[in-house]
Amino acid sequence: VGVAYTDTTTGEECLLDADEVILSAGALATAGLLLASGVGPAVDLAALEIPLVADLPVGQELQTRAKVGVLHTFHGESVRPKGAIEFPAFPAMGKPAPTSYMRTQPNIWAMIRSPLADAEGPDAIADLVIWANSNTDETTCPEPGQTAVAFNVSAMLPKSRGSVTLAPDGSGGHRVVWRPNFLADGHASAVMSYGIKLVRDMLASDPQKRFSQLEPAGTAANEAHIAAKATTFWHDSCTAPIGRVVDQ
């Protein structure tokens, strides 16, 4: 029992003996490694000419959270910190050089139960998160010196299911294909649309009228904005149902 692998630096084929192997590479890479090793749906692996080890639904129940930004201009004194934060190199994670990120002010977060939440009572879980930050490029503002504030809206309890599969990479190997599918059933879109309305109503109540909405434009553009701009919140899970406990 163990792991056979190739050292990508030297090209050496290696074998690591072990009494037990724990594969913990994240929801995407774990599923990809299992599929490439012959653990997954038999039909899919046969199409890729990967020898079958175990016919299991690896990669078939991907859950991930969608988010979308609602951009506003802030008409007031900016409180954005200046300068940058330096992060060192981390070659083991594919980051060979130091990285510099602009400083941003602390985010403001709110966890909310929308009207679309399923559960009721004291054990109910928030299904909507809204957070704001002002790290958006100032060039997006209509006038120089203004601050663009991004209010991010995320549906936290996805009902849609995506997948992680393999496809030929063109060089004899395989690449991981990520299909989040988070807007498939309309639930996440409806939750985020409700969140956009909350943001709009909240900022409209500001007595000093310091915010102007940049996008989405108008009050009826929520669904189109979500369809065009929604992206992942990178909380992928449930792609490797190979043990006795399977997430639902």
Image: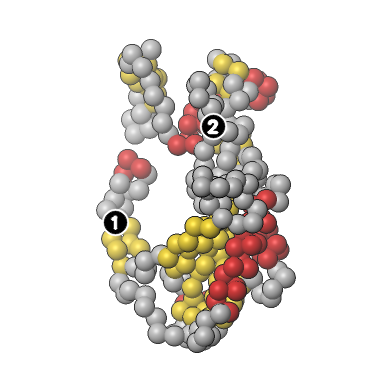
User: Can residue 198 be seen at all in this image of the molecule?
Assistant: yes
| Residue 12 percent coordinates (x, y) | 35, 24
Q: Is residue 85 above or below residue 7?
A: below
Q: Which mark is residue 244?
A: none
User: Can residue 231 be seen at all in this image of the molecule?
Assistant: no
Which sits earlier in the primary sequence, circle 2 or circle 1?
1
Q: Residue at x 31, y 53 (%)?
A: 97
Q: Residue at x 64, y 40 (%)?
A: 161
What's the coloring here? secondary structure
| Residue 41 percent coordinates (x, y) | 63, 23
Few, some or many residues within 10 Å of mark 1 (<14, 14–19, 20+): few
Amino acid type of the residue that numbered disc 2 sits on in the rendered structure: Asp
| Residue 107 percent coordinates (x, y) | 41, 65
Q: Residue at x 41, y 27 (%)?
A: 23
Point out the image quarter for the N terminus.
Answer: top left
The alpha-carbon separation of the residues under discs 2 and 1 comes to 35 Å
- Residue highlighted by disc 1: 87
Q: Is residue 130 above or below residue 20?
A: below
Q: Is 112 or 75 nearer to us in this picture?
A: 112
Element at label 2 = loop
Q: In the figure, is residue 57 to the left or right of 131? A: right
Amino acid type of the residue that numbered disc 1 sits on in the rendered structure: Phe
Q: Is 202 or 36 nearer to us in this picture?
A: 202
Q: Is 56 or 220 nearer to us in this picture?
A: 220
Q: Is 37 or 21 nearer to us in this picture?
A: 21
In the picture as drawn, the residue positioned furthest to the front comes out as 121
Element at label 1 = strand
Q: Which mark is residue 247?
A: 2
Q: In the figure, is residue 120 to the left or right of 245? A: right
Image quarter of residue 175: top right
Q: Is residue 31 above or below residue 190?
A: above
Point out the image quarter for the C terminus.
Answer: top right
